[in-house]
Image (spheres, helix red, strand yellow):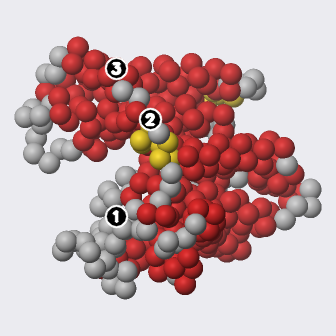
Amino acid sequence: MVKISLVVTKRYKKSVSTSTPAILSLSLLLGLVISYVLIWFFTKLDPASFFSTFYSTLASYAGLLEPLLFLSLLGTAISVAFYGSFWNVGAEGQYVLGMLGAIYLVMFSPASSMLLGSDGTTAGVAKLLAVALGGFLGSLWSLLPGVLKAYTKIGEVPVMLLMNYIAYSISDYLTAGPWKGRYTYGYIRTDLIPESSKLTVIPGFEILRYEVVAAVAIVFIGAYLLIERTWLGLEIKVLGSNPVALRSSGRDEKKTIVLVSAISGFIAGLAGALRLLGYDYRLAYNIGDGKTGFYGYTAILVAWLSFRDLKLVLPSALIVSALSSFGYRMQMSLKGLLPPGVSAFAFSQIFIGVTLAVYTVIRITKEYSVKLVVAR
């Protein structure tokens, strides 16, 4: 019997971070070429239509701005967790909890009456509190798997995946039950939030909100300073690379795990609150059926492409945003050529998945010496 396997024989000590932008660009190019070959096999689409559609997706940058902002926020949240080997695959649930916290404060809490007919200062404070509450609930949602991992050694991945669906169910229960709107024209959803609680549109860039842009900048800079300039950041990085060394230095490994889970969840919850106040303005029923844009899941790819380097979160988010938008544009180009039931979301996942696979292979072969071994 012949066994064929790939064996890692050497890991290069030199850093590959300086070559990562080139790796990202090459991965995107090869990913597009391979994706085209796969699509051509089923549809016989000409290459000019395929690549011109991708170019037009990048050229019409306005459609990329909204997903870019939220994937950057969520990608930062997940990357911070990845630094400490806390595999936050539950950002989707934390994102939903952030939405719940924001709409609760502006519509259903005792403080909601402050927003109705209030002056600008009071409304601004209320919006800030709504975003903070969303971040707090996202942090709590992430804290549970963090505590379980720290004190019981239960893996966080299955717990967080299950908690995503629990978050969906909580949202649907509230939307169809106590928070169900009165002015929804028969649809199951909440009423719109008050005008004074909506985020501020940037003139000339209707897709952007001042508060969301500011939050992305603050979170990105804050996360970078945390990881690169603080003792906690050093502990998080040591936890991710050598937890034995962290314990040997006298640091509390459990405390670090709990803190990194809480910080990551806070950023994800904050993103959900900003989304509701700035774009959705209400909760929809069956929120797990794409109503969140699946940003929490897609941002995992952003964090993976950035390879635990916060400086690369923004370009990685741009690539993923472009590929997602490209999938929807391609659906229009392939109208009538696809089997029934094949959606734009499926296409975007093909592009993203192929690019991610190519990136992983290139990165591994760049950082490791890999040999093909044939054994008999």
Residue topped by disc 2: 204
Q: Residues within 10 Å of mark 3 (few under 14, many from 20)?
A: few
Q: Which amino acid does label 3 sit on?
A: Tyr
Q: In which quarter of the image is the N terminus?
A: top left
Q: Residues within 10 Å of mark 2 (few under 14, many from 20)?
A: few
Residue topped by disc 1: 288
Q: Position of residue 38 (x, y in %)?
A: 24, 27
Q: Tell me if residue 232 comes above or below residue 337 in the rendering.
A: below
Depth check, front residue: 54 or 145: 54
Which label was assigned to residue 55?
Answer: 3
The residue located at (78%, 49%) in the rendering is 226
Residue 86 horizontal side relative to residue 334, left or right: right
Q: Tell me if residue 240 comes above or below residue 109 in the rendering.
A: above
Q: Which of marks 3 and 1 is nearer the N terminus?
A: 3
Q: What residue type is labelled 1?
A: Gly
Q: In which quarter of the image is the C terminus?
A: top left
Residue 35 horizontal side relative to residue 86, left or right: left
